[in-house]
């Protein structure tokens, strides 16, 4: 078991998804169980499925100095960075610590692959990219982080984590280690993933997409709804005498060692990530008030995760999946669901599970369909990705004495 | 920049694979000027970690990465199932990207489900954990031309923070199809090592590392490449982005002779990872 870690202060955070831009839009949708999913209208020949699409990305313009980074994913990142005073918070941290002392760790699964897909529809007579698409740094997984580092003006270590749907959860772990070792004083973490042909037709090929809005943990669940989102958080050391909140208290990372695209049948990798996250936070399962489950509405993932929560948590823990609100935002799911946990802690709001009507009998009393208000001292977020990659995060209101 | 100096770490099981230097013994000899390039070049490796059917179907990225991962774990004489792993690649699997984008531009409903799940950047590390039964943390990192340095930093930080050995694997493969008009990656190159917090009988070098501003004397990427000593290493400079590791592996080939000159691996336009190898201390 890993040892306790010193908590980190999350001094700013924000998310942008199909339910809207920023914290208020998310808190309002979660409080009123308002889903942002719509019938698929993405691309020329849309598959019959439902998606979580962010409105207006087609009209977002990057800053003039960053126009060479233009693509749907970087536009979504730029829209997301402007919400909730996040740019100003990073600027203040830059003044306080210096640009080289702020690390950037971003998670993405698709990065700018949508732009590469577009270039393949525009090839010239020789089969080459058109001139305006010969932007090597855009057609690579690190595109998002290079763009964000430039627009934020920060110069510390910068890396992209790309472990499929756990990507932007694991960023908190990497950032904590950099700060603990003194290699950075603060870190911008988060991620962005956009709808594109690769994921829509890819998950369709795996027969994992639903023809209706996704229904996590429903007895009649029929698969996932894909979405797009961006989210960011600024993490720093807790200063002596500081009563800052919310806090990152723990994380756990583990592998299933089982299969590329189906979870370990007993959830052993997920449970190992959970145990490590609780150990780093110094908490027992009973302390967790709210769990944001990975809850994709796929048959297997929900079965395995539902059983894990049922066997490890008391009946009073409030657990829900927010995939019915914004869809499964893939590499951005970890940061968006971290933001849901942070909102739960700040506002005492535990969301329900929208679209779900009848819970599968195999699951425990923790799973809730309706939102509830009440104090959330500790919240857990689960993220699982292809390749059997698992991450669990624990956030809290106060330092656990 | 006043970053503290992190703790010294130890390198075990260096592993190297490219068609002209297929294995660390061949690469080490060539980097010391004592061996020649393989002629004809070797065929793609056949990773024994995978079951025979999976071995044949494995994409080049997976075959390449698992070959050096297994060699590093064997050299370190550690149980693969217990060692957390960090895999780094600038581009991931370019041939699968080409397949995906071509198919989407033609007939998107024909997309292969297996190609899709192999298209994730963490496919290679996923197959490694499945093949070895490793349930420890696994990570997949990318940082464009700075991917080796960023992966090394991620692995070193994890090793130092958690005081546990970490497997580092770096790999890139050639561009194919229309991507060749935008992405310059020309051949197969993979490197690996285990980074450990304490010296063992398998330690081949002590690694001192720290962050340094980029632009200090002699630390740009060009200087890193011009400081390469061997014709063998110089012949690989343009192969693909993992060539960023060549200076460090040349240092590993020479380190038993004494302290090596410092290396600066660029992490970004403004920041470098400063590395220095020394012989591991004797008892």
Image (cartoon, coloured by chain):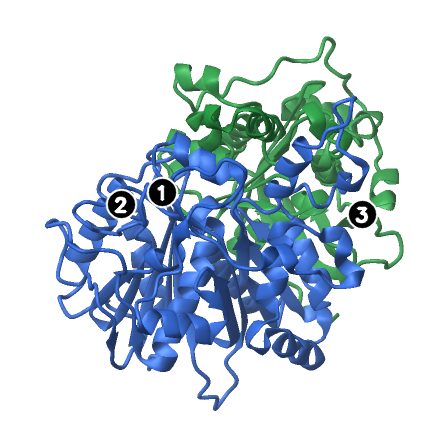
Query: Which one is in front in this view, the residue at disc 1 or the one at disc 3?
Result: 1
Residue B34 seen in this snapshot? yes
Which chain does tag 2 point to?
Answer: A
Q: Report helix, strand or loop for mark 3.
A: loop
- The quarter of the picture where residue A394 lies is bottom left
Could you tell me residue A269's position as x and y percent?
31, 46
Q: Quadrant of the C terminus of chain A?
A: bottom left
- Residue under label 3: B261
Residue A211 sits above or below residue B40 on the image: below
Decide which of B160, A175 is in the foreground and name it: A175
Tell me what hue chain B is rendered in: green
Same subunit: marks 1 and 3: yes
Could you tell me residue B133's position as x and y percent?
35, 34
Q: CA distance from mark 1 to mark 2?
A: 9 Å
Compared across the picture, whether B132 is left or right of A272 comes to right
Sequence order check, earlier mark of 1 and 3 = 1
Which chain does tag 1 point to?
Answer: B
Tell me what hue chain A is rendered in: blue
- Residue under label 2: A268
Same subunit: marks 3 and 2: no
- The crowding category of the residue bearing disc 1, from other C-alpha atoms within 10 Å (few below 14, some 14 to 19, many at least 20), is many
């Amino acid at each position: 078991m890993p040892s306790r870690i010193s908590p980190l202060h999350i001094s700013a955070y924000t998310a942008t998804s199909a339910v809207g831009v920023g914290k208020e839009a998310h808190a309002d949708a979660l409080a009123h169980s308002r889903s942002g999913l719509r019938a698929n209208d993405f691309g020329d020949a849309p598959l019959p499925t439902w998606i979580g699409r962010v409105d207006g990305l087609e009209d977002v313009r990057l800053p003039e100095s960053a126009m060479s980074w233009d693509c749907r994913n970087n536009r979504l990142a730029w829209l997301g960075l402007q919400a909730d005073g996040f740019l100003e918070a990073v600027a203040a941290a830059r003044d306080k610590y210096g640009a080289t002392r702020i690390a950037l760790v971003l998670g993405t699964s698709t990065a700018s692959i949508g732009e590469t897909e577009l270039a393949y529809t525009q090839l010239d007579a020789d089969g080459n990219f058109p001139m305006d698409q010969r932007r090597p740094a855009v057609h690579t997984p690190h595109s998002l982080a290079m763009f964000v580092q430039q627009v934020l003006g920060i110069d510390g270590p910068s890396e992209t984590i790309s472990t499929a749907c756990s990507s932007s959860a694991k960023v908190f772990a990497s950032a904590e280690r950099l700060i603990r070792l003194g290699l950075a004083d603060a870190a911008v973490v988060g991620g962005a993933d956009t709808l594109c042909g690769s994921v829509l037709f890819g998950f369709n090929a795996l027969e994992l997409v639903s023809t209706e809005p996704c229904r996590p943990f429903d007895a009649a669940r029929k698969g996932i709804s894909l979405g797009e989102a961006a989210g960011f958080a600024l993490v720093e050391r807790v200063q002596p005498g500081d009563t800052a909140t919310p806090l990152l208290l723990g994380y756990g990372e583990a592998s299933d060692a089982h299969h590329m695209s189906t979870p370990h049948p007993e959830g052993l990798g997920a449970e190992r990530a959970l145990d490590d996250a609780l150990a780093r936070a110094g908490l027992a399962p009973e302390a967790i008030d709210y769990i944001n489950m990975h809850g994709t509405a796929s048959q297997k993932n929900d079965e395995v995760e539902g059983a894990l929560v049922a066997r490890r948590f008391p009946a009073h823990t409030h657990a829900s999946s927010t995939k019915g609100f914004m869809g499964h935002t893939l590499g951005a799911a970890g940061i968006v669901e971290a933001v849901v946990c942070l909102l739960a802690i700040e506002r005492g709001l535990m969301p329900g599970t929208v679209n779900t009507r009848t819970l599968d009998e195999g699951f425990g009393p923790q799973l809730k369909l309706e939102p509830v208000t009440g104090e959330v001292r500790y919240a857990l977020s689960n993220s699982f990705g292809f390749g059997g990659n698992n991450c669990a995060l624990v956030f809290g209101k106060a330092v656990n004495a | 920049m006043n970053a503290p100096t992190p703790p010294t770490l130890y390198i075990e099981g260096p592993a190297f694979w490219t068609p002209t230097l297929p294995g660390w013994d061949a690469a080490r000899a060539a980097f010391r000027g004592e061996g020649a390039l393989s002629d004809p070049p070797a065929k793609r490796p056949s990773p024994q970690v995978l079951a025979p059917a999976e071995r044949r179907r494995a994409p080049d990225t997976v075959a390449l990465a698992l070959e050096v991962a297994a060699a590093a774990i064997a050299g370190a004489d550690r149980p693969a199932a217990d060692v957390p792993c960090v895999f780094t690649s600038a581009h991931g699997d370019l041939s699968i990207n080409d397949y995906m984008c071509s198919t989407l531009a033609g007939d998107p409903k024909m997309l292969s489900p297996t190609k899709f799940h192999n298209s994730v950047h963490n496919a290679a590390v996923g197959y490694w954990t499945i093949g070895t039964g490793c349930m420890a943390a696994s990570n997949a990192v990318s940082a464009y031309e700075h991917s080796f340095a960023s992966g090394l930093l991620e692995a070193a930080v994890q090793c130092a923070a958690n005081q546990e050995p970490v497997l580092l694997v770096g790999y890139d493969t050639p561009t194919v199809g229309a991507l060749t008009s935008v992405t310059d990656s020309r051949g197969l190159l993979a490197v690996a090592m285990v980074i450990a917090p304490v010296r063992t009988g398998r330690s081949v070098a002590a690694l001192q590392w720290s962050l340094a501003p980029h632009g200090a004397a002699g630390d740009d990427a060009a200087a890193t490449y011009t400081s390469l000593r061997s014709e063998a290493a110089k012949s690989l400079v343009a192969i693909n982005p993992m060539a960023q590791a060549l200076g460090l592996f040349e240092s590993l080939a020479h380190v038993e002779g004494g302290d090596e000159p410092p290396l600066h691996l660029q992490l970004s336009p403004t920041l470098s990872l400063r590395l220095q190898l020394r012989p591991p201390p004797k008892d």
